Amino acid sequence: MFKTFHPITIKSSTLISIARETMKYVIVTGGVLSGLGKGITCSSIGRLLRARGLKVTAIKIDPYLNCDAGTMNPYQHGEVYVLDDGGEVDLDLGNYERFLDTNLSSDHNITTGKVYKKVIEQERRGDYLGKTVQIIPHITNEIKENIVRVGKESKVDITLVELGGTVGDIESMPFLEAVRQLHMESGGTENCVFIHTTLVPVMGVVGEQKTKPTQHSVKELRSIGIRPDAIVARGELPLEYDIKRKISLFCNVPLEAVFSAPDAKSIYVVPGILEDQGLTNYLLKRLNIYAPVINMRKWNKFVKNLENPKQSVEIAVVGKYTHLHDSYISHLEALKHASSESKTTVEIRWVEAGDLEEKGARLLTGVDGIIIPGGFGDRGTEGKMVAARYARTNKIPFLGICLGFQLAIIEFARNVLKFEDANSSEFNPKTKHPVIDLLPEQKDIKDMGATMRLGTNKIKLEKDSQINELYKRMTIGERHRHRYEVNLDFIDRFEAKGLKFTGRSMDGRRMEVAELDGHPYYMLTQFHPEFKSRPGKASRTHLGLVLAAGKYKRKKPKK
Ligand code: GLN
């Protein structure tokens, strides 16, 4: 945090840390449409500020009544991302963690549900001493307190706040009012800037870039009392100069504060696109921070490797939301991290689990590797087992995660141990062979929200196993999200037939990793390695898969 509001006295980015006292805020709002990549804009800004030696954290505001994302269907909101502390949060927090290379806690995701729950609990306790409890000031105060507290506790210089939804939504109103007040209370523009992301569509045969939606959304924002300091305009192509000028004039922001965010081939190039237009310098100028030294070396190396592959592999992702790629976003990012580290392009073949049930394993012909990610519910499970069996019997590199881990074990029980009715008690509570069963502590749980085995737990690895070779460590910490686990009654029978449990919980009672003897890469994990994967620090198991897929492809007879 910064002590001075006044002229720049700090001479180098190392000195910045000495003068911390006042928190600075960068607030990102969105107009026109949802799904504009506000999260990536926010994450990229965070990355750029970090590259100047500043300490940065990020908060996502989701204006829905769910207390967290844990009970939400991936159909509507994409993947549920899991944090170290077990918070089940919006997938944008995954982007923040990946771009900022930091670990966040569930307090960094503020939802309407969380805020109202707290205020109503306080009202029931009598904390408001007979007052009428209202959206303004009680809800807005609670929102502001949350933002300020999270920033303070994170011990950072700058707190980024991304406001989910679109300006003009009824749901967003209390949050916009809260950040308007925060701007004033934190000392105005020197300590709090607003960045508004909008869409500039292209219309007609001549391909004219249209600014009207941007103008209207800024007007809406100004009617609430918020004046954007900068505009980031999304669009297919870079903004033309005249269009930038028009936005500047009609939206009342300086020309140097209109930034173009054209469609990019990878999210990881967005920080570079914004930096090249001077976004960081502009922000630092507004916030009165002097931090001229840029260090993007590692990031640039990561991007360069990503863009200069030496080989390519095709990996099948088998799931039941394969038309909604956001449902598997952390896997896709983990594969990109692995891709950069191994200089291998990963082409994804999306395979719908239900189609495998109908059409069989031929849908997987020619792939160099297969992933079955986590999931819930019976639908598609038989198809996923077709994939697990195909990978096992054809020695195709395979990564099964959480539900993928459990289904590969069920497939093995059915086809190798010959327990024909083997299943998880999640799908068939009456099976005689519940090789996957409810965690003992889950038996009496009735509520669905935040009650799974969640968050980071330590895992002991078996010496000289493949997983141990990948991590080069004996103990690891990875994130979890499950209610079911391998039934200990069957362990010996699996191991006798070559399916070895090479990672267990610290007390030895929970199976966390399984590998198959004699298979080049059949890696099963109960935990979710994808959540901790970062640029330059790829998930070990995803990297293992990509490397094994490369080897498999090289050995494959050429057609
Ligand atoms: N449905 C399984 C369980 O609850 C797997 C969960 C998951 O894949 N995240 O244990």
Image (spheres, helix red, strand yellow):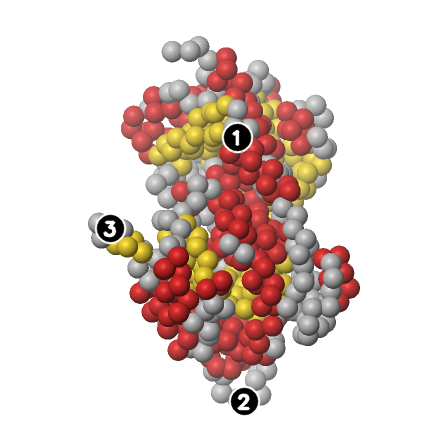
For label 2, count other residues whose C-alpha is less than 10 Å away and answer few (under 14), some (14-19) or many (20+): few
| Residue 146 or residue 155, whichever sits in front | 155
Q: Residue at the spot x=48%, y=20% of the render?
A: 396
Q: Could you say where residue 309 lies in the image, as x and y percent from the top left?
A: 52, 28
Alpha carbon separation for disc pair 1 and 2: 66 Å
Residue 66: image quadrant is bottom left
Q: Residue at the spot x=48%, y=18% of the render?
A: 553
Q: In this view, does 21 lie to the left or right of 313?
A: right
Q: Could you say where residue 225 lies in the image, as x and y percent from the top left?
A: 45, 78
Looking at the image, residue 498 lies above or below residue 353? above
Mark toward the start of the polypeptide (1 vs 2): 2
For label 3, count other residues whose C-alpha is less than 10 Å away and answer few (under 14), some (14-19) or many (20+): few
Q: Name the element at disc 2.
A: loop
The residue mark sitting in front, 1 or 2, is 1
> Most extreme residue toward the bottom, as rendered?
130
Residue 206 marker:
3
| Amino acid type, residue under disc 2 in the picture | Gly
| Amino acid type, residue under disc 1 in the picture | Asn
Q: Name the element at disc 1.
A: loop
Looking at the image, residue 239 lies above or below residue 386? below
Instruction: Tell how many labels.
Output: 3
Residue 308 marker:
1
- The residue wearing badge 2 is 130
Q: Name the element at disc 3.
A: loop
| Amino acid type, residue under disc 3 in the picture | Val
Q: In which quarter of the image is the C terminus?
A: top left
The residue mark sitting in front, 1 or 3, is 3
> Most extreme residue toward the front, as rendered?
242
